[in-house]
Image (cartoon, helix red, strand yellow):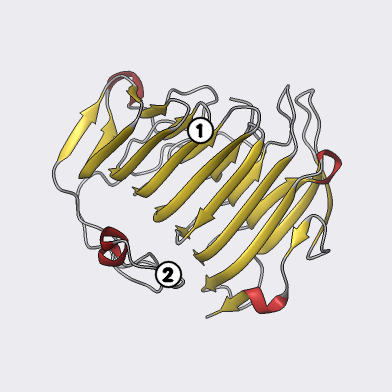
């Protein structure tokens, strides 16, 4: 999978067992009951209802409810590095929905969406290569609820074209929260929206987009925790390419066209 700013890391200690780790996240009960939620507010991450090792990618079609079981990689999916081209724990067919799942560690390349997909109340305890990668040419991808932490690089990788909507989510300890691919061999216009989401430092960038392909990032109801110096960049603009080179930065900050937010859309605490 072509991606941006990939780096090789030494092996990091992964946590496969244990629960009740207090970090910024969503209120699980509200999600489960289908209530409308406000911005995430330092709730407790969900406890798994059992665990299952996954040695080969699970293919998902239709709607699958994981019942809050934890899934983690074993065998060929048991790596914990940042190498390119890793297989995912779950691969969703076009139109599939995966909900109420915890992905433990090792997490391999998390989840791949082949086309339009919905991820509802999915939690990544320790992100592997990426938490989720979105492919296709002009689909709509939805992430509703859940959280992800300990991403050495990106949480969400947007390689396909279309629209990605992320809401009521919690991201903690990452480099980039969501990135429109900066150097994929096939490039698209990508529209990204992040709303009612809690971002907890350390982190570098909330959203990275390519202005030369007409990308846009909309931020609404964002809470940033533990970044009193405001070092996390809400929206980083790049000049993307299709030949694998590292993209160049093209400024940052709201402009009404590519980076769509105002100071009132972001709260620091």
Q: Residue visible at 52% across and 22% down?
A: 85
The reply to whether the C-beta atoms of the residues labelled 1 and 2 are less than 8 Å apart is no
Instruction: Give 53 or 65, whichever is nearer the viewer.
Output: 65
Residue 40 circle label? 2
Q: Is residue 212 visible?
A: yes
Quadrant of the drawing holding the N terminus: top right
Q: Is residue 9 above or below residue 231?
A: above
Helix, strand or loop status at disc 2: loop
Q: Residue 235 appears at what percent x and percent y? A: 71, 58
Which circle's residue, 1 or 2, is located before the other in the chain? 2
Side of 238 where 206 appears, left or right: left
Q: In this view, does 95 lie above or below 269?
A: above
Residue 111 circle label? none
Side of 6 where 16 appears, left or right: left
Q: Is residue 49 above or below residue 159?
A: below
Crowding at mark 2 (Cα within 10 Å: few <14, some 14-19, many 20+): many
Instruction: Give 60 or 86, whichever is nearer the viewer.
Output: 60
Residue tagged 1: 82
Q: Residue 147 appears at what percent x and percent y? A: 40, 55
Helix, strand or loop status at disc 1: loop
Crowding at mark 1 (Cα within 10 Å: few <14, some 14-19, many 20+): many
The alpha-carbon separation of the residues under discs 1 and 2 comes to 28 Å
Q: Is residue 225 above or below residue 71?
A: below
Instruction: Give 162 or 112, whichever is nearer the viewer.
Output: 162
Q: Residue 12 appears at what percent x and percent y? A: 40, 42
Q: Residue visible at 51% across and 26% down?
A: 114
């Amino acid at each position: 999978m072509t991606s941006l700013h990939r780096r090789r890391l030494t092996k990091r200690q992964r946590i496969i067992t244990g629960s009740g780790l207090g970090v910024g996240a969503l209120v699980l009960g509200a999600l489960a009951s289908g209530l409308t939620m406000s911005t995430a507010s330092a709730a407790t991450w969900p406890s798994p209802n059992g665990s299952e090792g996954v040695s080969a990618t699970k293919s998902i079609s239709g709607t699958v409810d994981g019942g809050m079981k934890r899934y983690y990689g074993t065998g060929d999916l048991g790596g914990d590095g940042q190498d390119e081209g890793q297989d995912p724990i779950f691969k969703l067919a076009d139109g599939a929905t995966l909900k109420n799942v915890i992905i433990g560690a090792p997490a391999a390349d998390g989840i791949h969406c082949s086309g339009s997909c919905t991820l509802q109340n999915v939690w990544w305890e320790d992100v592997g290569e990426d938490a989720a990668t979105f492919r296709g040419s002009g689909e709509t991808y939805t992430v509703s609820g859940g959280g992800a932490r300990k991403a050495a690089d990106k949480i969400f990788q947007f390689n396909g074209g279309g629209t990605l909507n992320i809401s009521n989510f919690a991201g903690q300890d990452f480099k980039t929260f969501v990135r429109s691919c900066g150097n994929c061999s096939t490039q698209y216009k990508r529209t990204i929206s992040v709303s009612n989401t809690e971002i907890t430092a350390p982190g570098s960038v909330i959203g990275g987009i390519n202005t030369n392909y007409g990308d846009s990032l909309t931020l609404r109801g964002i809470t940033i925790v533990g970044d009193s110096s405001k070092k996390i960049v809400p929206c980083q603009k790049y000049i993307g390419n299709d030949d694998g080179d590292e993209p160049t930065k093209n400024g940052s900050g709201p402009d009404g066209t590519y980076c769509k937010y105002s100071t009132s859309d972001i709260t620091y605490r």
